[in-house]
Each structure stands twice: as C-alpha cells, then as structure tokens.
Amino acid sequence: MAIATFGGGCFWCTEAVFQRLKGVEKVISGYCGGNAPEPTYEQICTGRTGHAEVIQIEFDPEVITFEKLLAVFFATHDPTTLNQQGADRGTQYRSVIYFHSSEQEEIARLTIAALNASKMFSNPIVTEVSAAVAFFPAEPYHQNYFNDNPGNGYCQVVVRGKVEKLEKLFADLLA
C-alpha cells in the first residue's frame, strides 16, 4: 500500500470523491501543514494554525496509480483559487499536495506543469506541493461524512456535485 495526502478545500468533499475509487483502501480526513500540536477543527477554522483540511489516502498502486489519483484531484476541485474552494475561504482550504516520496513530488510537479501548459484551466494552478509532515486525523464526526450525512445541506449542494462529476468523468475508476 502507498499513501497520498491531498487538500482540495473541505475534506468532506475530497473524502467522498476518493472513497469511491477502485484501489483506494482507506481515506481519513484530517489536518496537515500547520504549527499547532494536536489541532482541533475549531482551531483549524480560525485559519491561524497554518493547517489545511486534507485527506490521507491509503491506496494500492497496482490498482490505481498516483497519476490517476492526481487526475481525479485536479478534476474535482479548482486548483487555481488561492486559499478558497467555492464559498470556503481561508488558508485551511488551500489546494495542496503533500508528497511522501521524491517520485510523488516529481509526478505532482510534472502534472502541474503539463496542466498549465495545456491551458486546461483559464488561470494558473496555485496548488502547493510540499513534503508530507505530521498528519492529524480529524474528529470522528468528520470521518465518512458524506456517506453518513447525505441529507446535510452542504452535502446536497456541494459534495454531491463533486461526486457526480467524478462519476461522469471517471466511471472506469469507480469501485
């Protein structure tokens, strides 16, 4: 198994997307990249801890590659908005890839360069690419959020749209 750590706005969205992929064994919502020891959701929401809302993905690279995970990542959030995804604003919602190896770093940087060169997005990608640092799992009520709370307003309006986009664009990758 391999690990990937991505931040693409609210972790409820990214978790719901990546949980549906073949080869993804586990997705944990959490916090990464900040300076507070044992951060809480309330602390993260202030934007003062430096942490991003992220997901840590445990995946089988024989079934789904890091490149395919990146394709899904870039297609299911806006990597061109700094510290914002939709109405969610603040550094905790930044687009970020925390790499776990030099190979992941190289693939992430080459992917971003290729996407920028292709002009797939009308603005340049601002996704941060940084070495993985301490990961803190979010509180239990944040885990598996969309699946456990499908009637929640945010899930209906925001998360469901990202899951539907995944299903449309990446049907061949779905579990």
Image (tube, grey):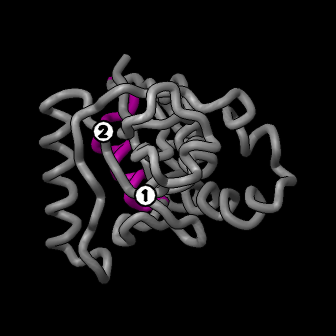
Query: Label 2's element?
Result: strand
Please name the residue shown 14% across and 72% down the image: 117
Please name the residue shown 74% across and 60% down the image: 154
Q: In the rendered image, which residue does mark 1 sit on?
A: 91
Question: Residue type at mark 2?
Answer: Tyr
Q: Nearer the viewer, residue 159 or 10?
A: 10
- Which of the two discs, 2 and 1, sits closer to the camera? 1
Say if 20 sits above or below 115 in the image: above
Question: Residue type at mark 1?
Answer: Thr
The first of marks 2 and 1 along the sequence is 1
**Residue 52: x %, y % from top left:** 44, 46
Query: Label 1's element?
Result: helix
| Residue at the limit of the structure toward the top, as seen here | 1
Residue 120 falls left or right of residue 137: left
**Residue 160: x %, y % from top left:** 70, 59
Chain part drawn in magenta: 62-76
Q: In the rendered image, which residue does mark 2 sit on?
A: 98
Q: Nearer the viewer, residue 141 or 40?
A: 40
Residue 175 in sight here: no
Question: Which image quarter holds the N terminus?
Answer: top left
Residue 141 falls left or right of residue 80: right
Crowd band around label 1 with a 10 angstrom C-alpha radius: few (<14), some (14–19), many (20+): many
Q: Nearer the viewer, residue 90 or 24?
A: 90
